[in-house]
Amino acid sequence: MSATIPLRDKKLWIFPMTYGGARGLAAAWRALGVDAEVIPPSDDETLALGARYTSGDECLPQRITLGDLLKIARRPDYSPERTAVFFATTTGPCRFGQYIAVFRKAFREQGLGAPAASASTSRCSGRPSESRVWESSR
């Protein structure tokens, strides 16, 4: 479901796909008045949490990104209404395009309110790129 989500009212977490790129993106969002932060480094807890909701047939990055999100949801200051995640997505043979669906399922099974997901995609729609925002909690 596409929706407009006011990011200035949320904590925006950015996945560190590249060290400098994620930090630059977070800085750009902060310059626009959004409370943006790069997701902290992955660790053993990340892998354990991600393993609960993946079968092992997925790529390791899917397990890691899911575990990182579940770690954020366990923080004392976590509030699904005040949390958003900036995430890239795509179509094609890689399961990368399915990450958000896996995130939603895991959060639902844990009884956690899912954060909003702001997803940038490379899919061509008459524009060089497009950005979509989904309300993950639905």
Image (tube, grey):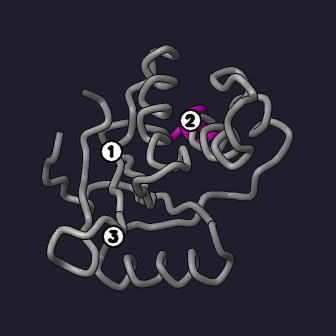
**From mark 2 to mark 1, how far is it between C-alphas?**
18 Å
The circle drawn on residue 92 is none
Magenta stretch? 71-77
The mark lying in front, picked from 2 and 1, is 1
**For residue 92: magenta?**
no
Q: Residue at x 35, y 64 (%)?
A: 120
Upstream in sequence: badge 2 or badge 1: 2
Picture disc at residue 116? 1
Question: The disc labelled 2 sits on which kind of residue?
Answer: Pro
State the quadrant of the C terminus.
Answer: top left
Given residues 81 and 43, the one toward you in this image is 43
Q: In which quarter of the view is residue 125 placed?
A: bottom left
Quadrant of the rendered image containing residue 31: bottom left
Point out which mark residue 34 bears.
3
SS at badge 2: loop
Relative to residue 48, is residue 124 drawn left or right? Answer: left
Q: Amino acid at mark 3?
A: Val
Amino acid at pointer 1: Ala
Residue placed at 38% from the left, 27% from the top?
Answer: 113
Q: Which mark is residue 76?
A: 2
